[in-house]
Image (cartoon, helix red, strand yellow):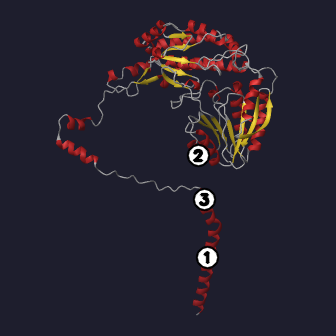
Amino acid sequence: MSNSSLTILKSTAQTGRLANPYFRQEQLKSLHDILRRNTDAIIAALESDTSSTTSHATTECALTLNLIKSHYSSIDPVAELEAEYRIAKSKDAEDAREPWGVVYIEPEWRHTPFFNIVSALSTSLVAGNCVLLLLENTTRALPTLLRKLFAEGLESDCYAMTAAPPEKAEVADCLRISQSPEAKDANSVGLGLVASGGRVVAVVDRTANVAVAAENLVTARFSFGGTSPYAPDIVLVNEFVKKEFLEEVLKRSIPFLAGSSSPLAVNGSANGAVSEKAGFKSNGKRSAAELESALKDIKETRSWNTNVITHGSNGAILDLSSALSSAKLLHLPPKISHPLFLISSFSSLDHAIDLISHNQNQTRLLAAYHFAPPKHAKYLSQFIKADRAFVNHVPYHILLGPAAPSYTKYPSTSHPYGPDCLTRPNPTFITPPPEQLQLSAVLVSQDQRAVKTLSFSAIQEIKVKPRPENIAIGFFEQGIFIGLGLYGIPILSGIGAGIFFAARAGRRRWCGA
């Protein structure tokens, strides 16, 4: 990329060309057309570069194209025009937002790269931003193909490609999207939305639907070669249902684990070389030796004992337990990007919470999956700190794409970015606030009576609102009521019967006398 390309992007952003909703729709339509006409080439490139099967590559391509269509449909020119002229019609525009101008995208290539790039690119366009995309020179099939397609489908004054990361000064005023957690370093450029690198943990309670939990978690862990950042890094299962859960996991993992001994297709170069540039991996195939290496690292860790439940050519299922018999808190394994399904047991919900909290070190989980009744799931989600929590399901859409940035508004499970992430607040108010008249008397007229009135109101005691009289029935209250039922009712019945017969006997004596 030449400096002139970035200069053109910044000029386009300043002129506000992408503020025109019809132009944004034209760009999204053109992008969708060029990609849909080359779906076969894209699917072939995905199979060549990643661990995707034909089915997974086709799914990734279809969901990516559907995302562009969704973004196109989200643009409402009439509503945008109405919002633009709110001030002219004496209406506040308190929720008005404006695009950043230029968005610089650093893609993640190790997992669903096509979806990663297009989701960030199309969301940037729909939010009204120009795009600078990092596509390094490589022998991989997908970057070469996308370089050609994007150049044909998008106008050069709102999209540009760079083969090398730009200098900090060049993009200091740009919004940076980095889809790799490793990008959080001192050399990062621009204002950043960086993918979170947190763990993903699943909790399966004893009262959960074990079959549903196994189906969701096995699919999440083994789909797309186990590379999704939202695949569970470890599954914590209540010890009372662990055996049943393992049986369901084994049943549902057979289609994923069974396969030939051919190498697993993942990112690496054709000759085994790996590029070190900005987390960029060269293309090619990875042998099963890398899976064995990852498995060996887990088995050799001294913090836990490892029991291999089953091991196939495309993955493994392992049971972890603490290496110290006296230790109740297991040191959870680090984040993994291999088709390894790790299981460990817990004795209670509080034990599961302690296990996770003990390993968090003030960092939040990327996601948590809670398989439990709603009341138990509420308890788990309250005390297990995660960017996102899902109850009794894994949204399969979330398995595509990079990890979403932490502490950002999460639009949906279908894509990691929303227009609010790529715009900034620009509120405009025309209606004075209710306090304007009172403060005008104080600040403008300097009316001492208004000052005294304001001061008198400020020093008034806060009136405490009465609490509702609802009495919560918890564990201990239930015990009390059960005790009263078991012992109180028979005693009261006996006392009542005694009083009745004593009264009747006394009445007979009195009448007889």
Q: Amino acid at mark 3?
A: Gln
Q: Amino acid at mark 1?
A: Ile
Residue at (80% x, 20% y) in the render: 262
Check the image and name the residue furthest to the right: 260
Quarter location, residue 261: top right
Residue 418 visible? The answer is: no
Query: What's the distance in space between the residues labelled 3 and 2, CA to CA?
Result: 19 Å
Against 406, residue 471 (above or below) is below
Residue at (62% x, 48% y) in the render: 350
Residue 482 location (% of width, % of height): 63, 62
Secondary element at tag 3: helix
Q: What residue did someone put label 1 on?
A: 495
Secondary element at tag 1: helix
Residue 435 location (% of width, % of height): 28, 37
Quarter location, residue 509: bottom right
Residue 133 location (% of width, % of height): 54, 14
Q: Find residue 379 and name its label.
A: 2
Q: Nearer the viewer, mark 3 or mark 1?
A: 3
Q: Earlier in the sequence, mark 1 or mark 2?
A: 2
Residue 57 location (% of width, % of height): 69, 18
Q: Amino acid at mark 2?
A: Tyr
Query: What's the distance in space between the residues labelled 3 and 1, CA to CA?
Result: 25 Å
Residue 52 or 174: which is nearer the viewer? 174
Q: What residue did someone put label 3 on?
A: 478
Do residues under tags 3 and 1 come within 8 Å of each other at their CB atoms?
A: no
Callout count: 3
Residue 505 or 380: which is nearer the viewer? 380
Q: Nearer the viewer, mark 1 or mark 2?
A: 2
Q: Nearer the viewer, mark 3 or mark 2?
A: 2
Quarter location, residue 106: top right
Q: Rate crowding at label 1 as few (under 14), some (14 to 19) or many (20 or more) other CA atoms within 10 Å.
A: few
